[in-house]
Image (cartoon, grey):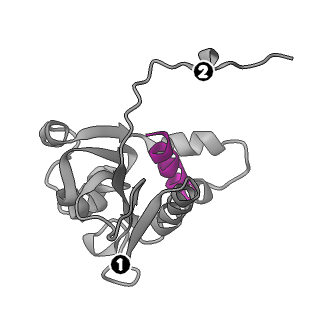
């Protein structure tokens, strides 16, 4: 039987300890943003943090997928000290599609973490959100934020491959994939 020592667990990853952070998950209604946000909230509270949340439901009931009116979100402010609001400015934004990016990116502080599902930025999706061109292709996002373009749809499908899920059911797992990325960050 082998044993693990602290020296075996060293990593080259730089760890930055923060007193608190405000994170928002944003996607289409039905993407599970409230579920992922609630799970992150519960985990943060169990770790001993003070938490405040703000679920944000779409402006329209069952608005067409990918449209600005159908964006759903969940914001969590967590801290090792007392907090009293769900946060005014985002430290991190997870945008599952172009509409979520467009309706939420202005709340992200300059230099904040921006995680996007790059698989959702097809021509039709960009058009529904009112983008003339793909904002991931230029430098405006990467110049202002710590941009992470992640192929969440593809990676999630590959992660659940072999479990017998339909493509639709596999795609429903993206919210927990995104939540896992936030846990890792």
Q: Which mark is residue 9?
A: 2
Where disc 2 sits, the SS reads helix
Tell me if 43 is positioned left or right of 161 in this view. left
Write down the region rendered in magenta: 171-185
Please identify the quadrant where the N terminus is shown.
Answer: top right
Q: In the rendered image, is residue 83 in sight?
A: yes
Judged by depth in the image, the label closer to the viewer, 1 or 2, is: 2
Q: Nearer the viewer, residue 185 or 20?
A: 20
Query: Under tag 1, what secondary structure?
Result: loop
In the depicted view, which residue is nearer to us: 134 or 106?
106
Please say whether residue 117 is visible from this viewpoint. no
Q: Mark 1 highlights which residue?
A: 63
Residue 30 in percent (x, y) is at 48, 70
Say above or below: 85 vs 14: below
Residue 145: percent from left, percent from top:
21, 42
Check residue 13 in the rendering and tell me which mark sits there, or answer none. none
- Residue 184 drawn in magenta: yes
Gap between marks 1 and 2 measured at Cα: 47 Å
16 relative to 103, above or below: above
Q: Residue furthest front?
A: 81
Q: Earlier in the sequence, mark 1 or mark 2?
A: 2
Residue at left 48%, top 57%? 49
* Residue at the image point whose x is 56% and y is 52% from the top: 47
Specify whether residue 75 is painted magenta: no
Task: Quadrant for residue 111, please give it.
Answer: top left
Q: Residue at x 32, y 70 (%)?
A: 85
């Amino acid at each position: 039987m082998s044993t693990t020592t602290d020296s075996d667990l060293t990593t080259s990853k730089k760890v930055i300890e923060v007193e608190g952070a405000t994170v928002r998950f944003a996607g289409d209604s039905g993407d599970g943003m409230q579920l992922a946000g609630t799970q992150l909230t519960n985990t943060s509270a169990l770790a001993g943090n003070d938490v405040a949340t703000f679920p944000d439901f779409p402006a329209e009931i069952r608005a067409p997928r990918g449209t600005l009116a159908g964006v759903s979100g969940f914001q969590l402010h967590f801290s090792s000290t007392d907090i009293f609001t769900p946060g005014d400015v985002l430290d991190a934004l997870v945008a599952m599609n172009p509409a979520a990016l467009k309706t939420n990116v202005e709340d992200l502080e300059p230099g904040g973490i921006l995680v996007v599902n790059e698989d959702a930025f097809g021509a039709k999706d960009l058009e529904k959100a009112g983008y003339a061109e793909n904002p991931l292709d230029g430098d405006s996002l990467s110049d202002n934020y710590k941009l992470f373009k992640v192929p969440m749809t593809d990676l999630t499908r590959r992660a659940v491959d072999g479990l017998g899920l339909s493509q639709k059911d596999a795609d429903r797992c993206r919210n927990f994939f995104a939540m896992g990325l936030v846990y890792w960050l």
